[in-house]
Amino acid sequence: MNQGPAGHVTRSFNRPLAETAPRAERRTFLRTVDGVTIDALYEPGKGTSASPSELSGDLSGDLSGGHFRATSGELAIVVAHGFTGDLDRPHVRRVAGLLAEHAAVVTFSFRGHGASGGLSTVGDREVLDLAAAVAWARELGHTRVATVGFSMGGSVVLRHAAMHRRGPAHGPAQEQVGRTGAYTDAVASVSAPARWYYRGTKPMRRLHWVVTRPLGRTISRYGLRTRIHHRDWDPVPLSPVESVPLIAPTPLLIVHGELDGYFPLDHPRMLAAAGEDHAELWLEAGMGHAEHAADDALLGRIGAWAASAAG
C-alpha cells in the first residue's frame, strides 16, 4: 500500500467526554491525509493545571468548547499501541497514566482498531495515523513532542520518525519530509521488530495466519475487535531497521525484553546497530513483550527519558 505524507488533522467528528473526566481532557476524531477517522484522546500531564481557557489552537466544533494552549515548552507524549490494542484498553490506559507523570499524553486507536475507521494494514499506513496525532499535539500548543510505540506501534514510530524529520538547516518548524507539525523530537520504540515477515517464533506464525487468512481476519474482527485489510503491501514499506539511520539526529531509544516471545534479541540489536552511536538500547531482564510486560518502573524511566531527550 502506498505511503503518503503526514496526516492532515480535522475535527469534523467529536465525542463528548464522560462527566467524570478532567476539564482539560479532549476526545475527538482526527482525519488522516488518506481520509481515515482516528479516535484520539488528549490528557494534560499530572503536574499541570491546564484548563480549556489556558490552551490554544482552533478547536471549532469541539463539543466541550473553548480553546487550548499548552504551557510553553511543555512536552506531549504520543502513544502508539500494539496490534489489537486501542486507546480504551486497560493496558493502554495504564501506559498513558504512568507517562502522564512526565508529560501531557495523546493516545489514539490505529485504523481498524477500536472506534477508529478504516482497516488495519499492520504497520504500513498506520504511519499516517501517528502523523495526525503528532500534528494534533502541536496544534494544541505543545512545542515538544515525543513518540512512544509498542510492538507494531514500535515499528510505526520508527518509520514515522524517518519520514518526518526536522531539518537543522531549516530551523525548528520545517520538516525535511512530510507536513510541518508532524515531526517528533524524541522516539522510544518498545518491543519492535527489526524486519518484516518474521515467522521465527510461534506467536508470530500465529499472527501471520490471522493476518493472511480469511478465517483469521474474521476471528480478529469479532474476537479481537481488530479489522484487518485483506490486501498485501504494495509496495512493501521501508522496514524498521532501514528506517533507523534516517532518524538521526532525533534522539532514539530502543527497549526490548530479554524474554520477548515474539521477537528475539537479534531484533533490538539490529535496530541499535543501525543507529550506530545515535540509538540508545535498553535490554530489560525478565521482561516479555510490549505494553503488558512493561512494568510501572520501566514506563516511568521511559517517560523520564522522553522528557529529557525531547529537549
Image (tube, helix red, strand yellow):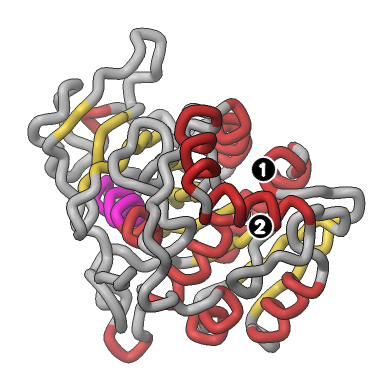
Q: Which residue is mark 1?
A: 291
C-beta proximity under 8 Å, tags 2 and 1: yes
Residue 93 magenta-highlighted: no
For image coordinates 61% across by 52% down, the residue present is: 209
Q: Which sits in the foreground, 269 or 225?
A: 225
Question: Which one is earlier in the sequence, the residue at label 2 or at label 1?
Answer: 2
Q: Position of residue 158 (x, y in %)?
A: 52, 69
Q: Would you say the magenta stretch is mainly helix, strand or loop?
A: helix
Label 2 vs label 1: CA separation? Answer: 8 Å
Type of residue at label 1?
A: Glu
Label drawn at residue 190: 2
Q: Quadrant of the N terminus?
A: bottom left
Indicate the quadrant where residue 18 lies: top left
**Any part of residue 309 in sight:** yes
The span shown in magenta is: 132-140
Type of residue at label 2?
A: Val
Label 2 SS: strand
Q: Residues within 10 Å of mark 2 (few under 14, many from 20)?
A: many
Q: Which sits in the foreground, 123 or 33?
A: 123
Q: Position of residue 213 (x, y in %)?
A: 52, 51
Label 1 SS: helix
Where is 285 relative to 176, above or below? above
Q: Residue furthest top?
A: 19
Where is 158 relative to 284, above or below? below
Label drawn at residue 54: none
The reply, left or right, for residue 259 in relation to residue 121 is right
The reply, left or right, for residue 198 in relation to residue 16 is right
Q: What is the count of numbered marks?
A: 2
For image coordinates 49% across by 85% down, the residue present is: 246
The reply, left or right, for residue 3 in relation to residue 266 is left
